[in-house]
Image (cartoon, grey):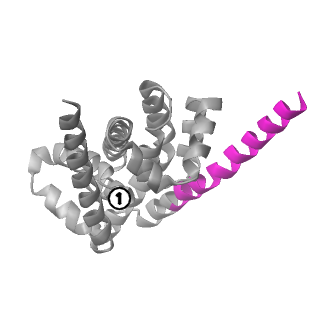
Amino acid sequence: MKDSKRLFRLIALILLISIIGLTLWHSQSIDVEAITQRIEDFGPLAWLVFMLLYAVGTVFFFPGSVLTLAGGALFGPVLGTFLNLTSATIGAALAFLVARYLASEWVEEKTGGRLKQLKDGVEKEGWRFVAFVRLVPLFPFNLLNYALGLTRIRFTHYLLATYVCMLPGAIAYTYLGYAGREAVGGGEGLIQKAMLALALLAVVAFVPRVIGHFRNRHKQDDAEE
């Protein structure tokens, strides 16, 4: 029985690594416009197809920024943000569970010494550490999902911190995708939309500095106490 489980895990892991490798190999040739056109062909079911693609793509290291831009172009800034954020969180949850129950050795090998930093951080701060690494991109998003699966954090804490703290980036990149689609289509108010997209990106870029500043001050206060 144990041998059968090990064989199943080995086969599943080989399949997972193979698909991830193929995705990374072809990632440079991925086109946002091509993705949006393919998804639009599904008509009323386009939102469901998009969510499935995003969630599964997250597990297999499909570039999340490309999908987020596509979501903004397809569904607009409001619905697009919701679909992008929800799909990315579902994908992050799946990758977390795969790492925790299937691919722990492979993830440890890929993350190297940084895994200890993650484990130590999670043990000290719990969900707050997850919130920090979501807001401050110290690790690649797709790999981070797997690495956090090897820590002792509760799944519900991981899920909530991920959903809430990915919101700023989801809003910014979704709106950027929407503005880009409007520019191509010749919509009204292009200058205002472009300026708002740039402002949102600037805010997202500035957030890590603010978070890092308060985090360092908190550590200094703890050290002084």
x, y percentage for residue 197?
A: 48, 59
Percent coordinates x, y for residue 8 in the rendering: 19, 41
Give the image quarter of residue 29. bottom left
Can residue 30 be seen here? The reply is: no
Q: Is residue 212 magenta?
A: yes
* Quadrant of image for the N terminus: top left
Pointer 1 residue: 69
Whether residue 160 appears in magenta in the rendering, the answer is no
Crowd band around label 1 with a 10 angstrom C-alpha radius: few (<14), some (14–19), many (20+): many
- Whether 147 is drawn above or below 63: the answer is above
For badge 1, the amino acid type reads Leu
Secondary structure mostly taken by the magenta-highlighted segment of the chain: helix
Q: Which residues are magenta?
A: 198-225
How many marks the image carries: the answer is: 1
Picture coordinates of residue 39 (x, y %)?
A: 16, 56
Left or right position of 118 against 91: right
User: What residue is at 20 percent from the left and 43 percent from the top?
Assistant: 7
